[in-house]
Amino acid sequence: MSDQSMNSRRDEAELVRTLASLAPGHTSLTFDDVRMRSAYLRGVEAGARTRGATPSIASLRVWQSLAAVLALALGAMVVIGPRAGTAAGGSGVAARPEPVASPQVERDRGLILAPPERANPTTPRSVPARLSWAVGESAPIADDRPEASRPQRVDRARDVLMIRPAPAVLSVFNALAAPGESR
Amino acid sequence: MSTSEDVIRAIFDADAATLVLYARTWIDRPDAEEAVQDAFAKLMLQSPAPDDPRAWLFRVVRNDAMTRLRTARRRHRLSLRWFAGPRDTRDEDPGLIRAAGPGSADAERASSALAGLREELREVVVLRIWAGLSLERIAGLLGSSPPTVHRRYREALSQMKQSMEQPCPTNP
């Protein structure tokens, strides 16, 4: 080892001794600060675990939004209700269907008017079962009540439950089914 | 099983100032103290306890300080892109090192010499001299080879020696 190298090593060792005799600069950090920080982090961890056990507000809102969209879509697609009054020249406003009474009761009330084509005893068996009781009736039962107070005949075979798409939805369906025609 | 509080307190008393000095390689003093505080707090929650808590602390502080440095530089780039170049966030505070006894001339010269080193040289000197880690452990901590660490250490000492031999401008 040359003198220059030895001198360099000696200087280096002296420098290391000098540096080692010095101390790192002051710090205002205390162990209490560390303890407080640790307690805070522990609380954050506990909070995260609690949040993980229950659905978050965000996920609840997503489900609420989906439910609302679904309800709106169903509302736009479907109108539930009888078409009461439309066939008999009424206002067309949907009305609650009357409860179905037994044929005898309705006959006694004078509500039943047998259709002319079905007044024939030879009415084919394809007549709906709900109307088959009327087969054999030859003439309407007299109703002496004023015209305004007479109940309108309800074709129950058609008006029990009608599911009707809204016009806007129908137009969309038509456009999808026949795109060439819609243009 | 986490590290007991007594052990952590003993490590804190012995090494907190060194850890702050180490973090000041990349960030200024308030951020460095925050990084060290976070590292000790995480050590309290760490389960199972690390095999070598001291080495673990130095590694965590280093990672935290570098993350803070990157964040600070990014913020600075976003806010002052049109006015100046990227700010050097290294701590140039002359109080990096203090004299353990009377007389502070060596401490001032050593502080400015240390502050003038590049980051990769400066961290090796701090880890070797004030943290007392062997070159092998430093190599493991930095993810470098021992020869590389040794070379950096020698280069750092050489630069510090040159810097400290220059006459101090404040004390003619």
Image: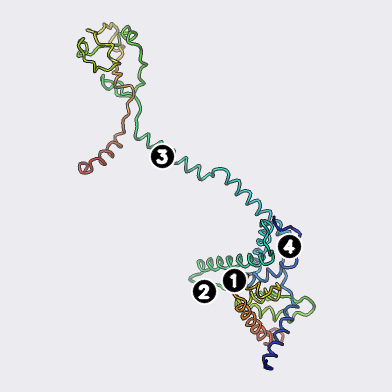
Q: Nearer the viewer, residue A148 or A101?
A: A101
Q: Chain of mark 2?
A: B
Residue A141, given in percent of the width and then of the height, sits at 26, 6
**Marks 1 and 3, how far apart in space?**
55 Å
Residue topped by disc 2: B85
**Marks 2 and 3, how far apart in space?**
52 Å
Residue topped by disc 1: B143
Q: Chain of mark 3?
A: A
Q: Nearer the viewer, residue A127 or B49?
A: B49
Residue A43, given in percent of the width and then of the height, sits at 65, 51
Q: Is the residue at mark 2 from the same chain as the one at mark 4? A: no
Q: Nearer the viewer, mark 4 or mark 1?
A: 1
**Marks 2 and 4, how far apart in space?**
36 Å
Residue B46, given in percent of the width and then of the height, sits at 66, 57
| Residues under numbered marks 2 and 4 in contact, where contact means CB atoms less than 8 Å apart | no
At a point 57% along the width and 73% down the height, the residue shown is B88
Q: Chain of mark 1?
A: B
Where B32 sits versus B155, above or below? above
Quadrant position of the N terminus of chain B in the picture? bottom right
Task: Check disc 1 and give the amino acid type.
Answer: Gly
